[in-house]
Image (cartoon, rainbow, N blue to C red):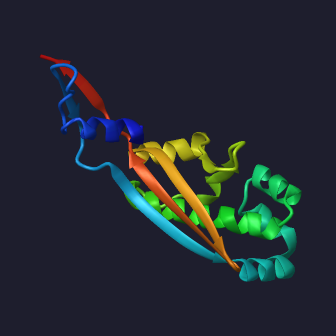
Amino acid sequence: MFFEFVQIFAKKIGRDKNSKTKIDLRGEEVIRGVGIDMVDVNELKRLHEVFSENVFCRIFTPTEMERSRQSSKPIEYLAERFAVKEAVFKAVAHRTTKKSFDFRIVETLNRPDGYPYVNVNDRLQAVLDNANVGELFISITTQNQYITAIAIAEERMEVSICQK
C-alpha cells in the first residue's frame, strides 16, 4: 500500500501521466501514528529470574513463547517482542476511541528471510479498524543489552479513480 501511495505522488500529485485519470486520495493523513520503545534485556532477565516463565506467559502469545524456547537467546527474543508490543501500542492506541487496548494481542513473528512483522489476528484487526489503520510497519534493532523497536501505523486509504 505504501509503495502504491509513493507511486501516485511521484506522478505529479494526483495525475497519472499515462492517462487522463484523476486520482482522489480521501483523508488528510497517511501516517496515523509512530511508536518507539527501548527494552533493557538485563531488566527482562531479572524479571525472569524473579517471576519465572509464568509472568511471560501472561504477556506473550503461545507462538512467541514457543519460538523463544527455540531461540539461542530466548530472553533477547522476548525483549524484541516486548519492545514491538509497546511501540505498536504507542503508534495506535491514541487513535482508538478508548485510547487504549491490550497490547498482549500484538504478536511479532518473522518472515522466512528474518524480517519481523506483526501477525494481525482478529482482535488486533478490530483495534486497527477502530483506529483507521490499514497496515503496520515495524523495525527492531539491538545495541548491547538494549533492544529498540519502532512501529509506523499507516492509514487505511480509500483511493477512488475517476475517468474524465
Q: Nearer the viewer, residue 134 or 112?
A: 112
Residue 71, quarter of the rendered image: bottom right
Q: Residue at x 47, y 65 (%)?
A: 35
| Left or right of 126, for residue 26 | left
User: Residue drawn at (33%, 39%), measured in percent from left and top?
Assistant: 5
**Residue 103, image x and y in percent?**
59, 59
Q: Tell me the quadrant of the picture where the C terminus can be found.
A: top left
User: In this image, 70 relative to 116: left or right?
Assistant: right
Name the residue at 55% across, 71% down.
37
Evaluate whether residue 99 shows in this view: no
Above or below — where is 50 with respect to 95? below
Of 15 and 70, which appears nearest the observer? 15
Q: Residue furthest front?
A: 18
Is residue 11 something one can see in this rendering?
Answer: yes
Drawn side of residue 162 relative to residue 34, left or right:
left
Residue 145 x %, y %: 70, 80
Q: Residue furthest top?
A: 164
Q: Quadrant of the N terminus?
A: top left
Q: Position of residue 55 (x, y in %)?
A: 79, 69
Give the tally of numbered discs: 0
- Taking the image as shown, residue 68 lies to the left or right of residue 111, namely right
Q: Which residue is depicted at the point 52% across and 63% down?
A: 150
